[in-house]
Amino acid sequence: MKEIKELLYSILNIEFIRAILSNPRNKEDVLKIKVRPVEKKGELFFQCELFTKTQAFHENLKPEEAAERLAEYMDEFRQMQISTKCMDYTILVSKKGKVSIQKKAVKGCVRKVELSHNRSKKYILKEGTPVPFLQDLGVMTQDGKIVHSRFDKFRQINRFLEFIEDILPKLEKNKEITILDFGCGKSYLTFAMYYYLHVLKNYNIRIIGLDLKKDVIAKCNELSRKYGYEKLEFLVGDIADYEGVDEVDMVVTLHACDTATDFALAKAVGWNAKVILSVPCCQHELNAQLQKDKGTKGYEVLAPILDYGLLKERFASLLTDGLRAKYLEECGYETQILEFIDMEHTPKNILIRAVKVGADRKQNGGEIKACKEFLNLNPMLGVLLDKGMEV
């Protein structure tokens, strides 16, 4: 393997980007190896990540050590793909041990080399910076580290703040902004909104969190007072009956169950809210309306979905949220359906973001009507909006 070792000695430098060793001779041992450069205390290392069927192992090696070790590994692998700033290499080893090295130049040498030791997403709330509400909610330790078992919640909070960051131009800085959070629960995201908008971005905001659980609301108010969040308050109440404000700039409803989301959206429209952020949950209403014995003309067409309970449930959920988005567009909102967090963490990963763009109702009435008639549906949000639900 002399030619492999010579190549590795020549390219394991600051222009190296990555290498992948694959196609092992022994399928029961290490199956793949990934190599990337890292910088530790100003010194260049190469991190080798070895993958078995069930585990991954890491080791950081200096350039000379890495060249020797990778050459040894190629006794057990038949292929290595290498990328540098200016070249791509493919190393192939035959069953008899014959080595061939192919190389291809990268036009313009435009690739960038990433040398950070722990490459991580740039979060709005950064790990290592203590945030009091994250500490009290069990997401962050006292020295600012994220609790491993709560990292999904940390990612979710930051993802949510990214959605808010996108709509900041819609929120005026020269007036008090009122935000309502329906079904706030333990209020991870409510506290995050206040911290981000008021503490980090210096917006004059008032946030009201609403939930039916008295003990949870009491705890949230206790924490709000502890942090000195003077304009963050939590109330016990129901979405459908709340009448505590006359004007609202932003309405947030996260995981409000079934038609509670519809009541929140109708309230938001009635307030002429500039921004709506909604993560629907437990969309049972239309699933119950999609009945075979109702003889809808759409049932025969969609039988491959509606004949199977699981598929029918998922279809009904998507249909519910699609109609909600269309209703909001009809009410003058620019509406998006976005992915909240990765599917492997929760199936409730759809977020509806609606931004007010005009007073006139858009022409979606025909689409909504056609869909309702096709499947013989009567969505709650449409009922509430047709009634002109008062706020």
Image: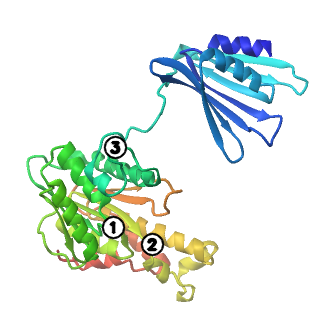
Give the residue displayed 23% in from the left and 46% down from the top.
Answer: 168
- Spatial CA span between label 2 and label 1: 12 Å
Residue 373 falls in image quadrant: bottom left
Residue 118 in the figure: left or right of residue 381: right
Q: Cβ–Cβ below 8 Å for labels 3 and 2?
A: no
| N-term-proximal mark, 3 vs 2 | 3
The residue shown at (78%, 34%) is 23
Residue 249 visible to an observer of this rendering: no
Kindly identify which residue carries mark 3.
Answer: 144
| Residue 373 horizontal side relative to residue 221, left or right | right
Which is in the foreground here, disc 1 or disc 3?
3
Q: Earlier in the sequence, mark 1 or mark 3?
A: 3
Mark 1 lies on residue: 327
The amino acid pointed to by label 2 is: Cys
Say the numbered circle drawn on residue 280.
none
Q: Amino acid at mark 1?
A: Tyr
Which residue does the image show at 69% across and 20% down from the upper left? Answer: 89
- The answer to the question of whether label 2 and label 1 lie on touching residues, with beta carbons closer than 8 A, is no
SS of the residue under disc 3 = loop
